[in-house]
Image (tube, coloured by chain):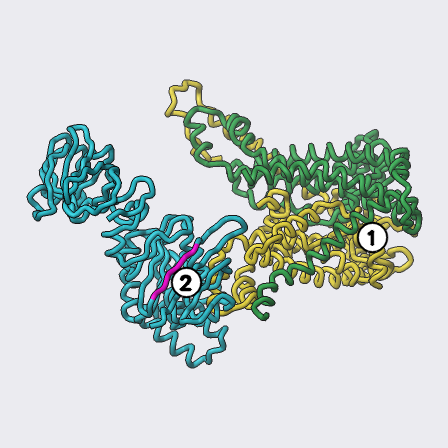
Amino acid sequence: MTDYSYPAPTMSPDTRPAPSRYGQTALRWLLFTLLGLFALFYLMPLFVMVTTSLKSLEEIRSGSLVAFPRDVTFEAWRTAWSGACTGIQCEGLRPYFWNSVLLAVPAVLISSFLGAANGYVIAQWNFRGANLIFSAMLFGCFIPFQVVLLPMARMLGLMGLAGTIPGLIFAHVIYGIGFTTLFFRNFYVTIPSDLVKAAKVDGAGFFRIFWSIFLPLSLPIIVVTVIWQFTQIWNDFLFGVSFSQAGTQPITVALNNIVNSTTGIKEYNVDMAAAIIAGLPTLLVYVVAGKYFIRGLTAGSVKGLMQ
Amino acid sequence: MIAWLERQIPKMVLAPSFVAILIFVYGFIAWTAWISLTRSKLLPKYELHGVIQYKRLFASPRWETAMDNLFIFGALFIGISMLLGLMLAILLDQKIRVEGVLRTIYLYPMALSMIVTGTAWKWIMNPGLGIEAMVRGWGFESFTFNWVIDPKMAIYAVVIAGVWQASGFVMALFLAGLRSVDGEIIKAAPVDGIPGWRIYSAIILPSMAPIFLSAFIVLAHLAIKSFDLVVALTGGGPGYATDLPATYMYAMAFSRGDIGQAASSAMVMMGVVFAIVVPYLYSELRAKHD
Amino acid sequence: MTPILDIQNLSKNYGAVQILNDVNVAIDPGEFLVLVGPSGCGKSTLLNCIAGLEPISGGAIRIGGRDMTQVSPKDRDIAMVFQSYALYPTMTVAKNITFGMKVRGVDAATQAQKLAEVARQLQIEPLLNRRPGQLSGGQRQRVAMGRAVVRDPKLFLFDEPLSNLDAKLRVSMRSEIKKLHQNLGATMVYVTHDQIEAMTLATKIVVMKGGVVQQIGSPAEIYNHPANLFVADFMGSPAMNLIPARTRRQGDDVQIEIARAEGALVVRQASYGHDRPADVILGLRPEDIVEAGFRSGATVQAAKCRIDLVEPAGADTYVVSELGGKQVTARLHAETKAQPGAMLDLAFDLAKVSFFAPDTGERLN
């Protein structure tokens, strides 16, 4: 280590010896060792998943959990994608992957768009009662979904959407509005209200101001919201397992069915490949746009609610 | 007339969402509350019968296990995640050159579905082939690590997976907090001869009390709602050993056809959430107004 | 001539809180009206009411003789410049300026022609393809003005447009606005809390406080004949000296007695009106108290005063003396020999004096 820049306390009359250079270096090594060990702890499951998915069942049974695969085979991946059994059907994750895409894309777009419009109204067109409505929406972010599960299932039945992807989209949109509205409202509230006034004087109306002025400057918060919603909806299991039926299930439900199906021999390599496939889209989003992901997390935490 | 309509546009834009929230959040809570006071079984019955479902609920050993598990899981999950997250944040705050990479590594589990997390840890903790087999393979023949199939220990296995998933998030929260502490104070401290660890314990940590609180609230919220993790890792088993209120509710609602029980358990869950969240929200809002 | 802007009995409240109370103002074409007052006096709200950005609670606003109560901002034939400039952040300067025309469906050729005209007039041609984020404060200010000018409105509204600029830039932009007013022959309403801006720009000033108009008049009227103690104190820098005094009638004349440590200072004034109370507040601007010998005339009276403080300010030197229990500022020549602690002969120009009633604060003469 060459970090000698730490200032010795020469300004004070303190006569204690400054920590020795060796002590400093030792501490520094300890620090890196600790950080490295934790990195291993967090990486280990991913490592095990990847290596296991590339091994044959034979090798899994005979070798160690953390050993590199001797003969790399993508057989498990092929099975996970197109052959693994989720109960009686054995079509792999593929159809469910597309279910999740078909579900997540519209649900993310609709809920984000509604959140943008709501946030725009609440932050810039405040009318009497708007803040009360906002509080009511925020409150909805905190309820445990179990409390709406039963009536929602019945409601989807009444609407003819039970067990369908549109039904799931509907549920995700409704219970996503609170967060998306919060994100956009907190963003738009920082924009000076003079902007709307200037545009009004220029002759623009409510929608024109939204399209021409507010949406173009919303890119950062759109990215944060879309990532947040996508992660939430892609990773959802509760709504998926409660409101879908065979054929319309999202990927998380299918993954769980593959892993916990009791027929045949346990194919751990297939389980791991399936788990990676299910986790890959959100992991990819995290790697590509981690900054926005973290911003969404902290904004979605309670601190952000209070702004 | 047109001017009037123009002025109503903002209200009309907000109205659909408001009506939706009113029906699908508040209306539905009311519906669930009502059903929890009836003898509904497979189908809802609307005739009120007092708190009979709650009596059944609190007399049920399975529910008792679920609540016990919630407190064990909640306490450990929150406690360990906070400690670990705080420690990682402090370690990362030492002007590390590879901080960005490490942060990414510590936080990535948060991007995964709990189902994926559960699946991975279920395999890692598999007694026959996972860690247990690995350590035995190293020559420690008597080593046992069979928590996932041990009714007494299974809930702790859930804690491990939960901590792995959420502690990085706590780290991110704390790190942001550490970075927002006034740099002047930290610079002044060594000049005054105050050792590094004292700076943390006496100056920085106390100023982060709000972050402790919000990390606590988020983790508590996660703990109460956690359902996927248990389903994927243990399926609530062995037996009912790792049941949580969320899995109990789901079982009553969708496999047992006992929606009265499901409704009453959901209401209790909401009660627990609000007992934690509402005082916090209230104090935060009050602090804002002062 | 129909006033271009005519505000009658205007009132505005938020719930029980009265923001504007019975405001009456009218201006003719080509006038430069400045609304001035401390923050919270309602001047910006009044401007927003004129623009139609805030609904009014009572009274009427006419622009060009037309009642505007139900007319939306875009149809009022106005243009507005904001304190924060309110430039559209994602649009270039050119798009900012033409946005209004685009919304109103003006054809592209006309847009381009008007844009070029305004850009030349305000010397912002090199900036047209930049975004607001790439401009300095002064440049943003110009663009904001360009966006207003291109509209060629009946009425320009300015909401504290210079308060985000540094002192030097503020002075130069101030003269630019004045030049713009003269070149365009436009009618302008301008809100500021800075009384110097008000004095330099206005042809007519409205002084406001607590939602109530205190005085309307030309800058000279406001400065020389403030209607009450508030206006006297608010307009002018350093502020008008407001000195408690007693009056004693002597025939047509009146003796004015001002208490101070060295014994009462007594001055006389002729033609002091009747029916005035004995206790008054005497208002005299610092420039109307000079060193004895520098001003003469029947109304100028000298008295020895103890100087407490000498503040050279380059062109002038201000000295402070205590009169009637108040710190009184006099504006002397830079070459004055005044020394703190010493006595100095000061000349008071009583022709310029204002009298106020101590209880109501209203002007008496």
In the image, is residue B107 part of the stretch drawn in magenta?
no
Which residue lies most toward the top here?
Answer: A15
Question: The magenta stretch spans which residues?
Answer: C22-27
Chain coloured yellow: which letter? A
Residue that appears at 55% across and 59% down: A218
Letter of the chain that mark 1 sits on in the rendering: A
Closer to us: A201 or A167: A201
- Cα distance in 3D space between marks 1 and 2: 58 Å
C49 lies above or below B266: below
B45 lies above or below A196: above
Q: Colour of chain B?
A: green
Left or right relative to B201: residue B54? right
Residue that appears at 46% across and 36% down: B183
Name the image quarter holding the N terminus of chain C: bottom left
> Is residue B235 in view?
no
B24 lies above or below C322: below
For the residues beneath circles 1 and 2, the answer to whether they share a chain is no
In the image, is residue C25 part of the stretch drawn in magenta?
yes
Letter of the chain that mark 2 sits on in the rendering: C
Disc 2 crowd rating (10 Å Cα; few below 14, some 14-19, many 20+) is: many
Mark 1 in CB contact with mark 2 (< 8 angstroms): no
Closer to us: B182 or A190: A190
Chain coloured cyan: which letter? C
Q: In the rendering, which numbered label is found on residue C7?
A: 2
Q: Quadrant of residue B86?
A: top right
Disc 1 crowd rating (10 Å Cα; few below 14, some 14-19, many 20+) is: many
Q: In the rendering, which numbered label is found on residue A151?
A: 1
Which amino acid, mark 2?
Ile
Q: Secondary structure at mark 1?
A: helix
Q: Position of residue C230 (x, y in %)?
A: 32, 46
Which amino acid, mark 1?
Pro
Q: In the rendering, which numbered label is found on residue C45?
A: none
